[in-house]
Image (spheres, rainbow, N blue to C red):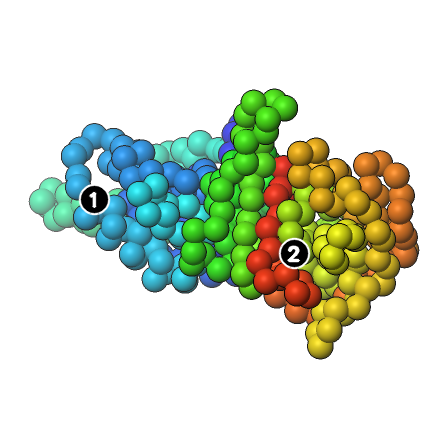
Amino acid sequence: MGETNTSIFAFHPFHLDPAKRSLSRDGQIVSLTPKEFDTLLVLVEARGSVVNKEELIARVWPDSYVGDGSLARNISVLRKALGEGVIETLPKKGYRIGLPVSRTDVVRKTAIVEAVVEATSQPVPGPAAPRTPAVYLWRRRALVWPAVACALLLGMAFRLVGTNSASTRSPAANVAPIRSILIQKKGALDPLAEGFKLASPDGDYTHVIWNLDHTGFDRWRLVTRDQNFYFRKLSDAEKEFALQRDWKLICVCALEKGAGESDIDLVPGGPRFDVEYLQEGNKYFVGLPNQISPEISYDQKIEYPGVADVDHPHTYELRYDHTTQTASLWIDGQERASGYRGHHQFQQNDGLMFGSFIYRTVMESSMVFRNVRFEAY
């Protein structure tokens, strides 16, 4: 017996096992050809990062030349098998997985089976029989030995299939429990390249911001004339883990005009927690909403001029205590509010979100983000 280290990838409701070359959805096998499986594996291993066409073709067809048509066919088949939105196309960039992907390293036991060889090399005992001409004896042996070998091989195959089926029906058995969660948007990197989706992709309203102090691009601006936000979903297992642990929602950001937000949506198991950054005339506030419709109302609302400090964004933290099931608001390391229980309106199962929206009489909103981070431990 020996041990090998392998990995299993989970992107709810799918589990992909490269060692077994199997893909399952909720415990049911999804049938793919070898090249379709290889195409999906490359995208899953990238875990939300964009993979361009040239790299995909080179890895899926390493020893042969193929055109874009073969890759396009594989992508089309995978979309039909997995459903819309699982594989995203970024024009002129490539493809990526649109669901959060977690990777778990597992240790498997392996064995070298020699029973078939040994069994087929031994004579099969039987009752004494009258002498038979040599030609008929040879024909009997020619029939008996393959039959015995086939029976043994079939028995072993059924055992292996049963093991694999049990593993597929219960993918969690091969996946280590979640020990922590970290999802973040960093600096001026394109959120789409970090695994986020844009809620309303129409319009060219996003771009990076140059930092005069550090002479470099370090923030991402989102402008909208209605509402728009980036989001990255959590799996059911991640949401369940977060609700049973302490977590932090961190936003290093600033408001140029209108209103902005950073949110964590834990539906269906829990509420949605929002931190909103608001402009009201020449005053600026941080709000913790408990209702959004028909009008916004706040559990707590704190006036804080630093909300508009675009040159030096401040750090806003929502810290959740799972024992009290409440969150506290910290600004630059100082507690400013506590006892926030979130709300149950507009729960869209969007996970980690950040964006901007129009507010009061300001008909265009602009928010800049240096870092947005959700961590549970």
Element type at mark 2: loop
Residue receiving disc 2: 258
Q: Is residue 232 left or right of residue 346?
A: left
Q: Is residue 291 above or below residue 214?
A: below
Residue located 68% across and 43% down the image: 254
Q: Amino acid at mark 1?
A: Asp
The quadrant of the rendering that contains the C terminus is top right
Alpha carbon separation for disc pair 2 and 1: 45 Å
Q: Position of residue 6 (x, y in %)?
A: 51, 34
Q: Position of residue 62 (x, y in %)?
A: 25, 31
Mark carried by residue 175: none
Residue located 31% across and 43% down the image: 92
Q: Amino acid at mark 2?
A: Gly
Q: Is residue 106 visible?
A: no
Residue located 71% across and 77% down the image: 294
Q: Is residue 26 left or right of residue 294?
A: left
The residue most toward the front is 282
Q: Is residue 265 left or right of residue 287?
A: left
Residue located 90% across and 56% down the image: 339
* Nearer-the-camera pick, 81 or 112: 81
Residue receiving disc 1: 68
Q: Position of residue 206 (x, y in %)?
A: 49, 47
Q: Is residue 254 above or below residue 356?
A: above
- Is the Cβ of the residue at disc 2 closer than 8 Å to that at disc 1? no
